[in-house]
Amino acid sequence: MSESKLFTEGKIGPITLRNRTIRSAAFEGMAENNSPSEALKSYHTSVAAGGIGMTTVAYAAVMQSGLSFPRQLWLRKEIVPGLRDLTDSIHSHGAKASVQLGHCGNMSHKKICGETPVGACTGFNMYSPTFVRGLKKDELKDIAHQFGNAVKIAMDGGFDCVEVHAGHGYLISQFLSPFTNHRTDEYGGTLSNRMHFMQMCIEEVLKAADGKIAVVAKTNMRDGFKGGLEIDDCITVAQELEKLGLDALVLSGGFVSKAPMYVMRGEMPIKTLTHYMDCWWLKYGVKMAGRMMIPTVPFKELYFLEDALRFREVLKMPLIYVGGAVSRTGIDKVLDSGFDFVQMGRALVNEPDFVNRMRDGEERCGCDHANYCIGRMYTIDMQCHKHVKNLPEKLVKEIENIRRRDEKRNSSTK
């Protein structure tokens, strides 16, 4: 057996990470007034102190129309001091700091993003729910420019890396997917045309970065449902991203507004999700139809690895694996399979110091994948149920029931 690469240094473009671990851009829900907060700094500082190579601050909108949640970052000049305070704290513990750049497109609401949500095409999005306005061609250039401007703000804020979100059904992904892109101009139709907006955004990002910070992108390997992008088309997208000159690629999958649990796996805790909701009619609707709208996709360790290996075969660029990395053995398997880095999300919500624990001999994180953290993050902040005091009894029972169902599913597949 080859010696483990886990605790060796690794390069992403102009930066060097102390090991091969990255905290994924799992949404924290910890921003206040779309700005950094003490809670956001405290969490990422704990992950940095816990041994991570780089921690990624999640979903930062490049402009107001790109906001999908009230407690989400929006990159703009006035928050640079807060960003610098955040990254200084991360750096003080030896980790690198990355920020994910994105635009949610049609997955928002006027009360959050300040206007009728926009997307590749006019329509109605059940996710919000809301009517959506299709973007005009001249607007696309401005949005791409805002991606570049966000890079400059990230640099001023002390970040070492930016991650462009081109997956999961957010705006760039909405242009790529035939499910959401029905345009008849040069931004729709063939996959080559549907990639034009992505190309514009990446070019602006790389121009702004100017080789001074690392630039990576998160992209889908499959959309995760019939009528979305499948693996062959996604390989074509990844090959184009490689040609554009990115420093690394994060391989993911799923579509939040259509196949959310394909992204995260497991069962959505509907009682938890609705317990924290403020909107009475949405709460009632999700209680009634949530199981149908958000079907369970069983969790298994390294659930994206089989697809990711297809990408590893055809791409020469550094690749970052994400998806069900919960054990030292699994992480070593990924690295031994030719991947350069491993991202983790829920494992580091459960144990921010999981990397140091692995160094000290721990084999597996304590995350039970009951997904309480996911159900909670849509309304307040992302926290593991094991760290929350005085949980309502109905939520405790839901977590226990989900565990039992998971155990039953796992035993039936053995």
Image: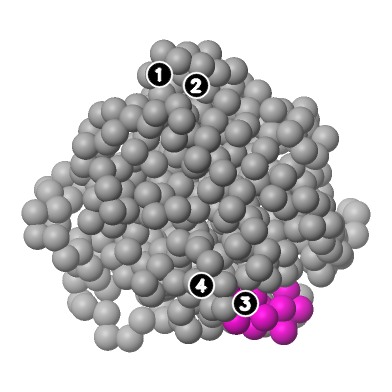
> What residue is rendered at 23% in x and 56% in y?
111
Question: Which SS class for mark 3?
Answer: helix
Give the CA distance from mark 2 to mark 3. Answer: 37 Å
Using residue 32 as the reference point, say whether residue 60 is left or right of it: right
The residue stretch that appears in magenta:
83-95
Tag 1–tag 3 contact (CB < 8 Å): no
* In this rendering, the label closer to the viewer, 1 or 4: 4
- In this view of the protein, which residue sits in the foreground, 87 or 17? 87
Q: Is residue 369 above or below residue 305?
A: below
Q: Tag 2, which secondary structure? A: loop
Which residue matches tag 3? 84
Residue 41: quadrant of the picture:
bottom right
Task: Work out whether mark 2 precedes mark 4 in sequence or the reverse, and give the earlier one.
Answer: 4
Asked if residue 96 is positioned above or below residue 340 in the image, the reply reads below
User: Residue 259 location, x and y as percent?
Assistant: 38, 39
Residue type highlighted by circle 4: Ile
Q: Quadrant of the N terminus?
A: bottom right
Q: Are marks 2 and 1 in contact (CB under 8 Å)?
A: yes
Q: Earlier in the sequence, mark 3 or mark 4?
A: 4
Q: What label sits on residue 79 in the rendered view? A: 4
Which residue in the structure is indicated by mark 2?
187
The residue lying at 65 percent from left, 42 percent from top is 204
- Residue 381 visible somewhere in the drawing: no
Residue linked to disc 1:
183
Above or below 128: residue 360: below
Residue 30 magenta-highlighted:
no
Residue 353, percent from left and from top? 63, 78
The alpha-carbon separation of the residues under discs 3 and 4 comes to: 9 Å
Q: For numbered disc 1, what is the local secondary structure?
A: loop
User: CA gap, disc 2 to disc 1?
Assistant: 7 Å
Q: CA distance from mark 2 to mark 4?
A: 33 Å
